[in-house]
Every structure is written in structure tokens, then in C-alpha cells.
Amino acid sequence: MKKILLTLMALIFVIAFALPIKTDASQVFSDVSASHPNYNDINYLLNKGVISKSSKFGVSDIVTREEVAVMVAKAVGLDGKQRVTKFKDVPQSNINSGYIQSAVDAGIIKGYSDGTFKPTTKVTRGHMAAFIARAFDLPKGSKTFKDVPVDHTAYEAVKQLVAANITTGYGDGTFKPQDNLTRAHIAAFLARAMRYADGGSATITTDSIIKQFKADGLEVGQVSNLDNKEFGNGRKEGKRILIPSLGDDSGGRLFIFNDAKSLKQAREYYDELSSIGPIFYSHIHQNGLILLQMNGDMNDAKFKKYADSIDKVVSGLNATTTPSKPTPVVPSIKGEMKVHFIDVGQGDAILIQAPTGENILIDGGPRSAGNKVVSYLKSIDVYVLDYVVATHPDADHIGGLISVLNSLTVGQFVNSGKAHTTETYFELLNLVESKNIKYVEPKIEQLLIGGWTTDFYLQSIYVNAKASDTNDASIVLKAGYKDVGFLLMADASAELEDLLVRAYDTLKVQILKAGHHGSSTSSSLPFLRAVNPEVTILSYGKENSYGHPDTEVLSNLKAVGSKIYSTAQDGTIVVTTDGNTYSINVKEFNPPKVNPAPTVTQPVKETNTTTELVTQPELAPTPTTQTKEYFKNCTELNKVYPSGVQEGHPAYDKKMDRDGDGWACEK
């Protein structure tokens, strides 16, 4: 018996060491968390032996020629044995001498005419493109960039990387070949190249997905090709799958599309077939989009198993994208639109759930609110965002988007294009690039969704990347569903409001999201009269140091008869509309009494390299006894204060506040 046990233990011991043991990069490197945008790439290279264990990976360090030579050489399996090299600055004693010489011999990287290799020289994006194109057998490409001219040394290499879906470049049509490359970035590019070499882009097919269905023990009956009449040229592949247990001629359809627009059209088509009760699953990844549609009597639990199989195929080939929860994307209630003004404290975050099925997130609040935004979205079953809009680069609008992009699947990233130098802004843009999210900079009056003949639309009515102030670079959005309109002002100033009033024949909507959190710099009376909102949403933090909302803004809103709702008072505000009427889930705002604003210290202001504590200039103290202003009646008071005055104002007289609401002589 002992002999048998010993034999079994020995066998288990051998098997345990024979099986590959996966290493988690977040447990190896102190600067690589599981939420890092390049975590999967670094993890992939670590388990492939391309990078070695150490206390830190150095994600933000600029990569050198020596480091790139070693990583690429390991990736393609070159000999790394230390040896004499051709270069006087790479002696045999250099631990990487073998990899450097092997990379040179393979034509991946070259030395200099003076007999040096210059191992510590920093590597640019253009260099990286050339090295990877030489190391891997990549397809020829056709896409060009305005900053990579035909005579550039990396011209052909950059096109090849794009053709292999290793990079997409930037949304402004540039590649930025002269920019230095961080270790995190080279990890992303190299991991994608290795996956491509392993056949990554060629094996995402309907056949490979169906094969996975069968491997997972799922029911698959007769499979047939769908002709090109099913969604035409926008469709890459299409299969009909019969599921016998659902009944005769029952089952579903599996598609792979060429672009997001084609997928959207397909989903809209199935939305119209409401009597069938379709369940949808879609997954965005760098090589295309998948739509699985099932009908008949299949329940959610069974459908989820098919969705999980698709995830297995996609995640194995697109490990750079954080997988979304493998739950079917179910359209919102048909004919209903919801706009969520998410409570993020002092900041903005707005989710539009369109009646056509799209989910659009506009800003994400400060970085500290990022996890809260993600949790809220998941709590209402939003795991895929068709659009994420960064209205302008201020941290109280974009900080939380970093958590969002790390946690959810995103189709398009819409950005004002305003240049900014903060670390938060750089990190966000790098995240968009590393995840291959489509980047868009809208134009004034551009329709992002819908058109003039559709029930729902989303339009950029203003944006200015060249504005001197970040607030006035804001993307101002107008959304509408049938007869109900929304105007979302971001942090637009009164000067910008005046421009909009003069530029547009009408700005009238039912719902206004006031600019700049209720600051005195926005929501001017002429603008509010032009918009004439029935409802105004104020998004700001409780007891904030800026005095938001300003009493003048409240006075102006009162003057135009707008109801006011506050995230600071009631938390997240949800407006639901069927296109004719609307409802709001919270009660109206009860403005507090006006008190003198104390001297405060503002939050840390973010800069490019350092942070400094910015102290607000001390306000002139409000006299204990204010100089009282007297008026005979409201007619006289309104000549000076057309909108009336609030309790606490020197001209306030309780006798003129006939309705006892804290406002005297309001119109």
C-alpha cells in the first residue's frame, strides 16, 4: 500500500511540474496592477519568457535600444548566449550581448557607422515600427499618416503595423513617429505582434466560434451560410445555426461585421422584430464585431453559455482588451429614453440610454469617482458603451473615465481635441490608444447619432480645440427624442453661451444641464431666456469650496421659471421620456439660504510634472451688518434687480416675499 501511495505521490509531483504554471504580472511587478491598461500585454510577455521577473516593470520608463533588442530577440526565439559583438560599447561581459548581436544578425536592428550600438539611446515610435516590421512577417498596408511622409524610414513599417491591427495611430491622423516609447507601450505593440504571428487575426471566424460551441458541449445542429442579402457588404461572415431542441427550423444567426456601423444597423433590424423577442450579444474587439442572435424559446441562462463561448474565442485573441461581463446586451425598453445625471460630487458624468439601444457616457467625474461610475453602470446592466465623450480635459470631467475604460467595453471615444498637459489627460489618451478604441474629434453641428428625420439624435453643437481656456473648448451636446430635448453645456462660459445664442435660430429644450456646476461664470440670463428650460440640472458636490451653485444663477433660473434639480441634494437624477412626456425620479431642489463664502483651499491642481497647492484668494469679509437697500415696492426693486432677490440679499424685504419662498419680487 505504501508503495502505491508513494508511486501516486511521485506521479502527481511529476505532473505538477510538467504542467505550465501561469504567472500573474500584478503579483510580480509592484507597478503593474490588474487594472493597468497594458496588464494583459505585460502578463502575456511575462508568461512567454520575453520579459523577466523583477521588483518593478518600469511601465512609464522610456525604453532603450538595448531593452528593445532583447525583448524582440526573445519574442522571435533568437540565441541569447553571451558572446563577442561587433560593437565597442557592447562587450561580451554585457549580459545581453548575445541577444543584441542576434538581433543585429537577423536584420532587426542596426548599429552605427562609428562601430557603436548606443544601447542606452531612447527608442521612438518610428524606431519601434521598423524593428517589429523586420522581426515579424506582417502584411502590406495602405493606411498613411500625415506626419509619416513617404520618404520616412518607417513609412512602410508603420503601414504594416496598421494592417496587422498592432496600432491604429491617433484620431487626428498622426502616428507621432518621433515620440519616445515607454516600456508599457512596447509591451503592447510586441504582444500584439506575437499574437498576430500566432495566427490571431486569421482565426476569429464563424467556424472557430461554432467549433468552440461544440467544444463547450453546447447544442449545434445544422449550420449553413447566409447569403449576402443579410446585411450586405458590411458583414464579413454570416452563419445560420439550427438548435433542434428549440423546435423545427429554430435557432439563430452568427455574424462577424467589418465595422461598428454595420453592427448597429443589424441590431436595429432585429430590434424591429419585437414579436420574435430576440436576445443580443455583441463583443467589440480589434479585429471586428460579433453578433449572435437567437430566437425561439431559448432562455437567458442557456443563451449566456453561447455568449461565454464567444468570449473564450475573443479573449484568447484580444487579451489587450479588458473583457466585459459576458452578459447579452439587451436593448432598453423600446420607445423609452433615459438620461442619468450621475452623482460624482464636484464634477459631471451623464449616461444617455437611447431608445435606439446605444449607451453614451458623457464625462466620468473626478478620478476619485471612477469606481462609483463603473459600479452604477453595472448596477443598471450597462457593460458596453457605444460612445464615451470627454467634453474637455479638466480632471473633474475626465478623471473617472480611466476606471470606465479599464472596466467596460467602449466602441468610440469622442474628445474635444483640446491639448492639455496633465498626467490624467495623458493617461486617458494612452489608454484609448492601447485598447484600440476608435478616436473621434467632432465638428460643430456634427450629428454623432441619428439625423434630422430620425426620432432620436445626438449632436455636437459646439466644440473648439483651439480655445484658450479648457472650459470654452467644451463639447456642447444637444440630444432629442421626438418632442423632448436636452442641452448639455459641460463647462461652457457665459461668453460661449452668448455665441450660441447668436449662432442658432433656437436653443429651446425641455431639459438643460447647466454649465460649470452652477458657477457664476455660466447660466447668464439672456442665455436662459433663449433656452427657456422647463427643468435645469445642477451637478456639483455638497459643501464644495467654490460656492456652487451661485445665487445669481439660482436667481436667473427662477426668473425664467425653470424647475431646478440638484445632484448634491438628491444624488443621481434620472430623466425618463417616451418622446412626448418625461418624468424625474427625485424632488425639486430646495435652495439653501445664502451665507458668506469662507476662505478655502482648493483641491490640488494637477500639472504636467508636479502638483502644487493653490490657495483661493481671500474674499473680502462680508460685514456683520450689511448696508440695507430699501424699495417702496416690487416695481421699484425690479428696476434694479429684474429677477427679484433672495433672502439674505440687502434688498430683501419679507413683506415683498408674498409666497414665503425666500424670494422677493420674483417674476
Image (spheres, rainbow, N blue to C red):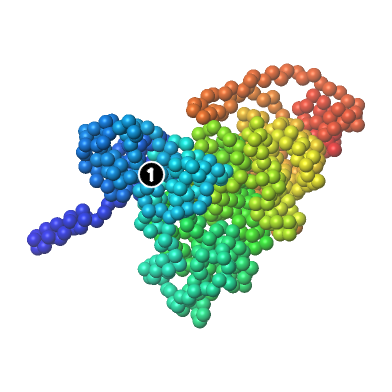
Residue 442's x, y, as percent? Answer: 64, 46
Q: Is residue 509 visible?
A: yes
Q: Nearer the viewer, residue 341 or 401?
A: 401
Q: In this view of the protein, which residue sits in the foreground, 268 or 161? A: 161
Q: Residues within 10 Å of mark 1 (few under 14, many from 20)?
A: many
The residue where tag 1 is placed is 131
Instruction: Answer with the quarter of the image where residue 342 lies.
Output: top right
Quadrant position of residue 498:
top right
The residue sitting at 45% across, 54% down in the picture is: 140
Q: Position of residue 38 (x, y in %)?
A: 42, 45
Q: Is residue 179 shown above or below 333?
A: above
For image coordinates 65% across by 59% down, the residue present is 355
Quadrant for the N terminus in the image: bottom left
Taking the image as shown, residue 188 lies to the left or right of residue 237, namely left
Question: Could you tell me which residue is drawn at 79 percent across and 24 percent down?
Answer: 650
Position of residue 474 measured from the top left corner of the image (x, y, whole percent): 65, 39
Disc 1 secondary structure class: helix
Question: How many marks on residues?
Answer: 1
Point out the image quarter for the C terminus. top right
Q: Is residue 560 above or below residue 546?
A: below
Q: Residue 627 vs residue 550: left or right?
A: right
Q: Amino acid at mark 1?
A: Phe
Any part of residue 187 in sight: no
What residue is shown at x 54% (from left), y 73% (from top)?
Answer: 227
Give the camera-side residue of 330 and 29.
29
Question: In the picture provided, is 55 more to the left or to the right than 254?
Answer: left
Q: How far across and how far down the image is residue 526, in percent?
A: 80, 37
Q: Is residue 303 placed above or below 534 in the rendered structure? A: below
- 521 relative position to 177: left or right: right
